[in-house]
Image (cartoon, rainbow, N blue to C red):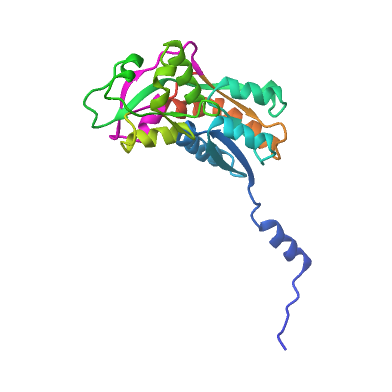
Amino acid sequence: MPAYRRFPRSLLLLAVFALPASAAEFTVSAAASLGEAFAEIAERFEAAHPDHEVRLNFGASGALLQQVRAGAPVDVFASADSETMDRAAAEGLVDAARRHDFAGNALVVAVPADATDLPADLAALAGPQIRRIALGQPDSVPAGRYAREALQAADLWDALSPRLIPAQNVRQALDYVARGEVDAAFVYATDLAAQPGRVLRAFDVPLSAPIRYPIAAVADSREPEAAVAFVRFVLSDEGQAVLRRHGFLAP
């Protein structure tokens, strides 16, 4: 028969307390355009808070709101527009009292890197050389909604509608133009760095109001202290420096 050794109770207690505590996981759902910046912010946050682990979930802001509304286990929500966050606040899905704008951006028209005749403005998109134009679904993707508003203001929406190719999020629109599947795409200025050497910035799109990114802890967060700490970190000098380095504007 195998021999069993009896250890003193004090040694057993020491062994238990010596076990590493598991990190508390929490989920940050953020607009697709925040991908690289939030990946770096999450890494820095975990280094400063080794007892927490950040799980990142990227997508179109409207789709992310639907996930929160459906009860997905989300702790922090960062949107690419105020309108989507306004809806979240009106429905009591986020802590409106701790909502903050944390970044800004610019909408641009991008073309494939090998394009020889770059459009100079929105009117030029109606030219014969521009046959397909990608943009995020306006009903769920803020970049698509900004694009629709700009085209409507320029009285070009109806004329260009047959050329528009919808994308699930702004990064998909960027992929379309980078692969040459479309002749132009509405994306954020910060997105261009995700496809270096494959896209060109044709022109900045005029908008009636600046683009603002808000962030807030989700009301039903399972890790409310971690959620608040992450929001605070995004707003800190360190978090803001990361965002500026990735091309985002001050809020």
Q: Nearer the viewer, residue 134 or 75?
A: 134
Which quadrant holds residue 128? top left
Is the residue 108 above or below the residue 227 in the image?
above
Residue 204 belongs to magenta span: yes
Magenta-tinted stretch: 184-211
Q: How many marks?
A: 0
Left-right relation of 7 to 34? right
Query: Where on the picture, by quarter, is residue 134?
Result: top left
Q: Is residue 116 left or right of residue 8?
A: left
Q: Is residue 59 magenta?
A: no
Q: Quadrant of the N terminus?
A: bottom right
Inspect this view and state whether residue 186 appears: no
**View extreme (right): residue:** 9
Residue extending furthest toward the left: 116
Picture coordinates of residue 70 (x, y %)? 68, 38
Residue shown at 43%/20% (left/top)?
106
Q: Position of residue 156 (x, y in %)?
A: 41, 15
Q: Report x, y in % for residue 18.
A: 66, 57
Q: Position of residue 77 (x, y in %)?
A: 61, 31
Instruction: Please say if 249 is above or below 136.
Output: above
Q: Tell me the residue at 45%/11% (across/down).
A: 153
- Is residue 51 shown to the viewer in this render? yes
Residue at 46% x, 27% y: name it. 243
Q: Nearer the viewer, residue 85 or 152?
A: 152
